[in-house]
Amino acid sequence: MNEFDDSRNSAENNQPEKPEEKEEKKNEPDGNTAKQEGQPDVYVPAKKTRTVSMRSFLVSVVAVFVAAVLLTVSICSQVYQRKLIDAKNDSYNQGTSDTGATDLAGVSKQLATLDSLFSELYYDYDDIDKEALGVALLKAYVEATGDLYAEYYTAEEFAEMSAENNGDMEGIGVSVIYTNLEINGVEYGVMQIIAVYENTPAAKAGVQVGDCIAYVGEGEDRVLVQAAGYTKAVAKLRGKAGTTASFTVLRKNEKDEYEEVSFNIVREHFTTQSVSGRVLDADSSVGVVRIMQFDLTTPTQFSAIMDELKEKGCKYFVFDVRNNPGGDLKSIEAVLSFFLSEGDLLVSTEDKYGNSSKDLVKVYTGTGDYAGCSVKKSDIGKYRGTPCVVLTNGNTASAAELFTQTMRDYNLAKIVGTKTYGKGCMQSIFTLERYGIPGALKLTTRMYFSKSHHVYHGIGIEPDETVELSEEALKYNVFVLPDELDDQLQKALQILK
């Protein structure tokens, strides 16, 4: 997950609290992406079934959407990561009709009529979960608007989404991908661990990058990942701090044979890793920095990794945003500020009425959840002039595309790889408590543009050097692709040197 969300005026959101991602019901771009097991599970006290009439509830539902047209934009962070759909400009340009309130009033009457019929005739009417029905109505409305990035979040979903974007997670501290592992000529579906976060339960327990989780659970509850399916298997790794995650990995021994290693790890709170970096094995003067997404942890992590690699002697950099689904506005603005000069244009936006705004590079002091997106005077332009190349693919989207295009606009980097996804619209999130409805509403409110005003929404960004991966390379997830098979990385090295 993962849309490019405006984060301005975030203090007004009253957000509770990263997500790559909940399971999305809408289409995502092709290709395997990494998923973090640490996505928080939100636990709330059980609620009694409401017995209020649906008529009064429907009136409040209609009222909130009519009033939403008049809302002053109060925005908070978004999921990252996770909902990349083939959107075109017409999905953004859907205006609100002057007769919208009248139409909604008619719908309200129709729904009230249905409720009357059910209440009088349906045998099990008293057993209907009115709260669940109300949530379904809200989600159905949002789905029917045609805004492919819109979403209604329940209070629980909103808390989970906000927590993930803030990097506040519960779990064991790993990122996994689903892949096939061949053993004695037989392929098994497993979850390969591609990252183990520092100072997390998994790291302390000895879990290693490259371990392949074959079983989740233990004893009678132990089940093959292949049998459970990826979604359910990941769910078994997740959980609340203080609970235990049990799983078995396949790990190669000294004889190059797979052996089982079982773990029982108590979950804890930890901060996610949105950026990773390494010194290239084949050339110690090159640093490879992978940005998984732009959440509220990204600016701080990016800066720390860049400084560390520079201290190790890296003079050339490859910024890998392949499979990066996007992220938060303040996050990407902070990262870009490291490469630009004060007063440079970061992004311009335009709403449906033609109102435009521009964000420029400047000192910014973030508060609360946005403290990690602060930009000091000394941060501005500190990496400008660094020789670098940006790697992209068809899953590079939204905020990652703004990063890519801006680096090109200011002649800071060459782009290598394949055409990006093509998402140039911005979503805003509104809390709904003031209208008596729990949760939040996300909807598309603006189109956004880089310095060149290049339009790539629904089109994508063409790289300077188009390089397709070989059939052999495509057998690997990009997160574990060996350098010698990564033709896109090899082309980047040619450009740098």
Image (cartoon, helix red, strand yellow):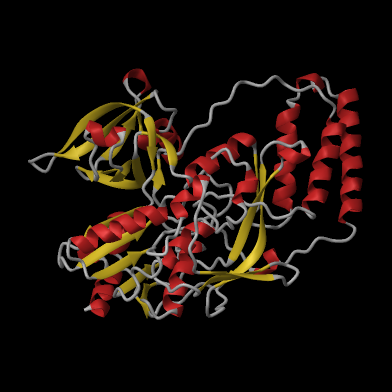
Q: Quadrant of the C terminus?
A: bottom left
The number of callouts visible is 0
In the displayed structure, 213 sits above or below 130; it is below
**Percent from the top left, x then y, of residue 312?**
17, 61
State left or right for residue 145 relative to residue 425: right
In the displayed structure, 52 sits above or below 435; it is above
**Percent from the top left, x then y, of residue 173?**
34, 38
Q: Residue at x 30, y 61 (%)?
A: 289
Q: Considering depth in this image, is 37 or 287 the residue closer to the camera?
A: 287
Q: Residue at x 64, y 45 (%)?
A: 13
State left or right for residue 414 relative to residue 420: left
Residue 127 image-quadrant placement: top right
Q: Considering depth in this image, is 223 or 388 the residue closer to the camera?
A: 388
State left or right for residue 407 relative to residue 309: right
**Percent from the top left, x then y, of residue 78?**
55, 50
> Please, which residue is most extreme toward the front here?
377
Residue 91 image-quadrant placement: bottom right
**Quick check: can you spot residue 328?**
yes
